Amino acid sequence: MDILPILSTLRRHKVTAALVILEIALTCAIVCNAVFLVGQRLDNISTPSGIVENELLQITANGIGDQPDAHARITADLAGLRQISGVDSVTMANQVPFGSSSWNSSIKLSLDQKRPTVQSVTVYYGEDIPKVFGVEIIAGRAFQTNDYTWFDDAAKSGNATFPKIAIISDALARKLFPDGNAVGKTIVTGTNEVRIVGVVKRLTRPSIMDYSTAGYSMLLPIRMTMSMGASFIIRTQPAERERVLAAAVTKLKAMDNRRVITEKRTFDDVRKAYFASDRAMTGLLIGVCVALMIVTALGIVGLGSFWVAQRRRQIGVRRALGARRKDILRYFQTENFLLATIGIVIGMVMAFGINLLLMAHYELPRLPAIYFPVGAVLLWLLGQVAVLGPALRAASVPPVVATRG
Amino acid sequence: MFAYYLQLGLRSLRRNPMLTALMVMAIGFGVAASMTTYSVFRATSRNPIPQKSDVLYMVQVDNWGPENTEKGEPPDALTYIDAVALGRAKQAHRQTAIYPIGPSVIPDDPSRLPMRQGAYAVGADFFPMFEAPFLQGGPWTTEDDDKHASVIVIDRKLNDKLFNGGQSVGKQVNLDGRLFRVAGVIDEWNPQPRFFDVVNTGGFDDPPGLYIPYSRAVDLQLPTNGNNNCAKDPGEGWDNYIRSECIWNGFWVELPSKADAVAYKRYLEGYAAEQQRAGRFSWAPNVRLRNVMEWLDVQHVVPPESQISLAVSLGFLVICLVNTVGLLLAKFMRRAPEIGVRRALGASRRTIYAQFLIEAGTVGLAGGLLGLILTGVGVLGVGLVFPKDIARLATLDPTLILLTLVVAVAASLIAAFYPTWRAAQVQPAWQLKSN
């Protein structure tokens, strides 16, 4: 098929051709970036927490007024919860992965270092967190009972009773000690020196600002009291969760009827709530992309039909001069392919420009190169599918049209 | 003539239902997507206190130095030391320190459960500064602030719960076992975005239920219910904590004129320089004084989701328009013979313009009506994408309805401009000859 006649025809229909090209270019630019944003969000949503999500429950409660015997009360609360049938283990933790509040500290490698090595690391407090959360210890050891200090004691007496040991996540260990073994090394959190006794495989942070540091976390041997938004974390069997959650709430209220339960949820709910906006944004962008492609396809159908109607006589003449139906069909398909190609080239440049803009404003990474060929193939297909109807109609124009009018 | 062209337009739209439906849908969907996302954008980027937004300023003083701050931007909250020092200096027309607290209200009736309330510790100036609407009584006085008095301002909802909506000024409210005397009751009041506490709420939250004096809250050692950031370990106990460089306070000032703002900025720099001389800061004074809209901008109150979805749907609208240009062109050019006849019978180019623009306008209007329905559906569905605190601000009010119709008609007229021009260029002689 010779493309020169097509080009010369297009040159005489500059505006209509330009409209098709513009539409394809804009669609290409927007869809590429929207799909890229969707990919980013999906990456966020699939961030692993490192904990046994389908076995955990979270209950947040608030006591009223001063709580003088805080240690005894929390010990009694935990013991009470352990009595509920189906409860595997229980602790009180200051935060959970994908929670809304976070406790962070900076990490230095020595006390006299000026700028911290890692600006912000999440610090988990709570007894037996690795066991209750189901986090695997891949090096060193877990905390032992006599390692623990109560939270209010540690906070009260400054550096004296602050824990001297810590467990860190593998991600943090790799960042702090790239050449290996972190166990036994000393780091500085805030102004306190702690020795690393263990490394956990993964323990994700709450309220993640930057997904590249989502795994930077640390555990300290501190028992939480019911304060500062700490919550009860209960581990149970997946099938037992609803029943255990209801039973635990009843139990907590029975032990102290003045307390306010501010939150009770399974960890599935925690994850769902945390990623709600990411999920919704994904849905929205996919919806817009589909709508865009439908509009573009319909636009090509509409303009194609117009074109075919306008050229009925030419088509008739060509058919009368011996062109086969296939040739007419090919003609319109090739024409669409040419327009789509120009549109795609312009669209890719625009997509790249929009991506640069997004990078500057929203700290997004660069659009991966794979988007360009995939986007091109997608739009070529879209164009071909859309033009098929009008092209078939053109192919069915009988040669006798040439002799009329 | 207008009515006749309108009639012609409607008839022509009926003649080609598929093409018409395509155009109406393209405009309808494009406009609806843009308007729905715009409603969210408008809600998040709006001015929460337009009458005073340029005389209210948030104060920032860099107490952490270049080592602990990023790009020279001072921390977004103040220490207790600075908040109290600025409050005592009274260098502004009005000023208030502020921090969120989370007390529980204990009803007198022992059978009712305690209620946890979103609340703020503020100064007496808070209420006139931010124009909180009082139903009963009024704010407490600055003397109450100085005396660390146990006074409280509650909102209508809490008044309904505790006093069945009756007169409550002078009565007592029990917070965590301590009694506070009601100074006033405000109407339900929840400026959005919550400019005076963006740092802890992101700008959107349920309305706070009560306010107590800042000085009293600190006496009671009520911890902040919001963010607390410490560059260094504050040490043991409350006294060390409030003397530390931990930041957890907001500080707002009202400065009626530009000259006042300049003077106050100079005062802040002087204050920071004094701290530097005293050895507390080892860096040059680094202070900020930002009015409401500047502060909301710096704090990125408009969520990126809102900006991105608005941009994407505007792109969608542009594509829909390009599409409409093509379809209108197809539609108008198909009627070249008809145009030829009209021109030959004496119609001027102007009348052709009028006829086809009116026809395009009817398409736009139809698209606008479809867009309006879809925008309504879209606004209802905003809650699926945005957090509920933001979603409930997106509403289909008269302005949005009007804007939807105007955008739809304007968009279709813009789209019709080129096709109409082409239609008016039709040579009557050529058309008459070929038929």
Image: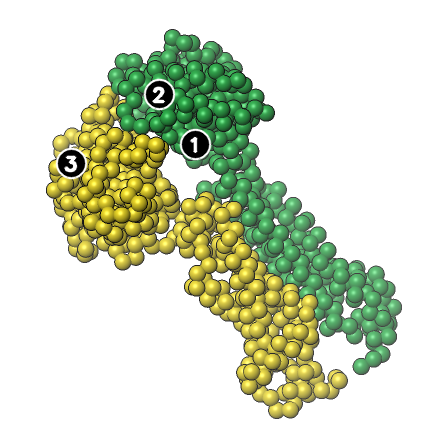
Q: Give above or below for B23 relative to B250.
A: below
Determine the residue positioned at 61% across, 54% down: A291
- Percent across and percent down for residue A94 are 39, 24
Q: CA distance from mark 1 to mark 3?
A: 33 Å
Q: Is residue B209 left or right of residue A368?
A: left
- Discs 2, 3 touching: Cβ within 8 Å: no
- Which mark, by number, is residue B255? none
Circle 3 — which element?
loop
Q: Chain of mark 2?
A: A
The image shows residue A173 at horizontal and vertical percentages of 45, 20
Please say if the residues under marks 2 and 1 sit with CB atoms less than 8 Å apart. no
Q: Give the spatial CA distance, label 2 vs label 3.
A: 30 Å
Question: Which residue corresponds to mark 3?
Answer: B148
Q: Amino acid at mark 3?
A: His
Co-location on one chain, circles 2 and 1: yes
Q: Amino acid at mark 2?
A: Thr
Tag 1 residue: A263
Subunit under mark 1: A
Q: Which chain is green?
A: A
- The amino acid sitting under disc 1 is Glu
Mark 3 packing: few (<14 Cα in 10 Å), some, or many (20+)? Answer: some
Residue extending farthest top: A146
Q: Which residue is mark 2?
A: A225
Who's yellow, chain-wise? B
- Indicate left or right for A308 with B9 as reference: right
Given the image, what chain letter belongs to the residue carrying mark 3? B
Crowding near the residue tagged with mark 2, few <14, some 14–19, many ≥20 C-alpha atoms within 10 Å: many
